Image (spheres, rainbow, N blue to C red):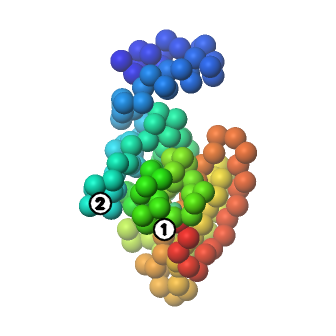
Amino acid sequence: MFKKLVQGVAWLGGKAVDTLFNLLDDEPIPKEFFSHYFSEAELIKSDTAIRHGIKNEPNSQQKYNLMMIAQHLLDPIREKFGAFSPSSGFRSKELNDLIGGAPNSQHMQGEAVDFEVPGVDNLKLYNWIKNSDLPYDQLILEHYEEGNPNSGWIHISYKTQGKRRQAFMLPRRNP
Ligand SMILES: [Zn+2]
């Protein structure tokens, strides 16, 4: 259903696509559309949400945003550094509040993902992304302690328009 609809309306432009998205809130984006290496489910799943019985269900626009991060940022990072599974992607407001996320966190729009790559120093990862041509909005090396390659994690965000292309390190947790 999704495939046919997308092929059918792609040429109609933004308005038709918006309408389509409204119709598809309940439908997952098929794996073959989503990205080479990542699935929608993997960027939505939250153990914390499950543990606390919190709903963590993005709407179709938020799912689309997750797909854009996967295709434009996560896939190329996976190509370079090898397999990883993000620790946090989409967060409903309830989930974000529960874990103490920033009130305007991009995770709530499906625009941000947190991850580490097993066996790769987070500082090396950060520097490589920072100096790459990847079209990120914000890149943050969070909670990193110098000299401890396993400390911290990478927070990366993507926006279709208005990319800030900011990169910085935060010694303390700031999801
Ligand atoms: Zn984050």
Residue drawn at the location 70% of the way across and 41% of the way down: 161
x and y, in percent, of residue 118 in the image: 38, 68
Amino acid type, mark 2: His
> Label 2's element?
helix
Residue drawn at the location 48% of the way across and 53% of the way down: 93
Cα separation, mark 1 vs mark 2, equals 14 Å
Q: Work out whether residue 97 can be spotted.
A: yes
x and y, in percent, of residue 170 in the image: 61, 75
Q: Is mark 1 within 8 Å of ligand 1?
A: no
Residue drawn at the location 53% of the way across and 14% of the way down: 9
x and y, in percent, of residue 50 in the image: 28, 56
Picture quadrant where residue 35 is located: top left
Name the outermost residue toward the bottom. Answer: 147
- Front in this rendered view, residue 119 or 28: 28
Residue 67, disc: none
**Which of marks 2 and 1 precedes in the sequence?**
2
Q: Is residue 48 left or right of residue 24?
A: left
Amino acid type, mark 1: Gly
Cβ atoms at labels 1 and 2 below 8 Å apart: no
**Number of residues whose C-alpha sits closer than 10 Å to that of mark 1, classed few (under 14), some (14–19) or many (20 or more):** few
Q: Is residue 71 left or right of residue 25?
A: right
Up/down of 164 relative to 68, above or below: below
What residue did someone put label 1 on?
100
Q: Work out whether residue 82 can be spotted.
A: no
x and y, in percent, of residue 58 in the image: 43, 41
**Number of residues whose C-alpha sits closer than 10 Å to that of mark 2, classed few (under 14), some (14–19) or many (20 or more):** few
What residue did someone put label 2 on?
52
Residue drawn at the location 51% of the way across and 54% of the way down: 107
Up/down of 2 relative to 75, above or below: above
